[in-house]
Amino acid sequence: MKKHWAILVVDDETVMCESLAAWLAEDGYTVATAASGREAIALAAANDYAIYFVDLKMPPGIDGLETMMEIRSLHPEASVIIMTAYATVDTAITAMKEGAQEYIVKPCNPEEISLLVGRIIKVKTLQRENLMLRQRLTKQYSFHDIISKNPKMREVFDLVREVASLRSTVLIQGESGTGKELVARAIHFSGDRAGKPFVAVSCAALAESLLESEMFGHERGSFTGATERKRGRFEQAEGGTVFLDEIGDISPKLQVDLLRVLQERTFFRVGGNVEVRVDVRVIAATRVNLQEEVAAGAFRDDLFYRLNVINIRIPPLRERREDVPLLAHAFVERLSREIGKEVGELSEGALRLLMDYEWPGNVRELENAVERAIVTAKTHVLTEDDFAFLRGASASANGWTAPDSLPLEEVVRQVILATLRRTGGNVREAAAVLGIDRSTLYDRLKKYGVDR
């Protein structure tokens, strides 16, 4: 209904201000007036108007363009219509560049005003309905900040609910960027440990000595720089959950230490001789195939069995393309608000491009792509041109050509290495991409002396 849309008229000419307000009120809109830019900004700070009619020349004080910019800083989604009795091409161009939606010349025609406002309100109504629909869909398909309507992901959600209140160790497997930590947090905050700490440790980010101190803490004087006792992440998580990200990257020594924690629920701080007992739940995550790491002798089988009590595999984004529009719209809504830029829509062409892209970096890459598009966007609708950088990435991935002056065997070696890098060292997935058996791929790696 029209009464739900509020309009502010800003003009220092009382007759013009009151006349325009009266015309709009007759059309059923709620209308407020302001006689200066300062007054308009104060009203905008306290109220949310859908449309602002702002006079360009308003002495004394700030002029119409300054008023418009202040209003748009408060309400980026607001539509501002600049009015002036001194129309020039330069002022019109300046007004539109600064963000005015329309530019009209006084004296105003009531019928033209009605048509203009009706057109803007129609667009805003559709935008509001689309936003409400997307929010309902996001709510329907969201689970602890994870958004998906893919059947495999819905199975993951069900499994998370089942195991949330158990003490059993969970191993989450999936490619980089699929959201392994989000799933770990969902497990923690869905269970009876939700009120206790959730402590994350990146096993790939630190050297062995630093990671050991980070996980288990250290005693004063245990090494250079250890000026006081430090509690490790396991102690900090007492009663809660420790999330060990990229567990496949830990050293053989730390594998032994971690096995003891899982078996005995005790450990020693670095440089200490007092046994520390903890009550924590361990959730581990990895981008590599630990079964293959065990087979290759790179990971302890007894530790793997301790970690793999409950196994959760997160499918890559290319296996759940129906989630791309849901995720893209959710990212647009959140990131445009965080960046402070009025972008609220994705064109059909943009969505087609996003759906066709392979997303080797998965959900994280999609989020980064949306943020980059918002930052460089020129309008409030993201088009395929705003995602042109993905076309180049896709072309370079799909339009590969063999290097010149290389023997066939070396070309094959380079293709195998590139595929292994893209799959994060997952031999099974790399073999599937290459269309060969895993045993054949293992033979090739052995032949080339490649440590994957």
Image (spheres, grey):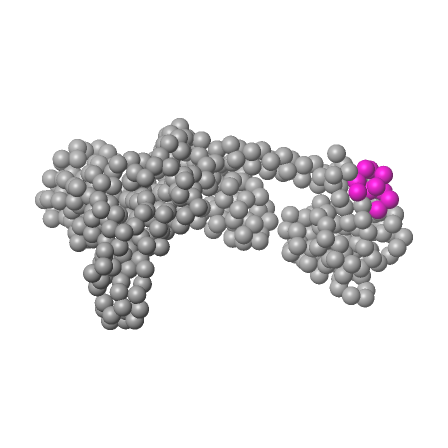
Residue farthest along the right direction in this orientation: 15
Q: Which sits in the foreground, 319 or 448?
A: 319
Q: Residue at x 34, y 37 (%)?
A: 166
**Left or right of 271, for residue 214:** right
Q: Quadrant of residue 308?
A: top left
Q: Residue at x 22, y 40 (%)?
A: 306
Residue 63 in percent (x, y) is at 76, 62
Q: Which residues are magenta?
A: 21-30
Residue 230 in percent (x, y) is at 31, 63
Q: Quadrant of residue 12?
A: bottom right
Q: Residue at x 18, y 50 (%)?
A: 256
In this rendering, does residue 156 appear at all?
Answer: no
Question: In the rendered image of this protein, does residue 343 appear above or below residue 209?
Answer: above
Q: Which sits in the foreground, 7 or 240?
A: 240
Mainly helix, strand or loop, the magenta region? Answer: helix
Residue 149 in magenta stretch: no
Residue 344 in percent (x, y) is at 57, 43
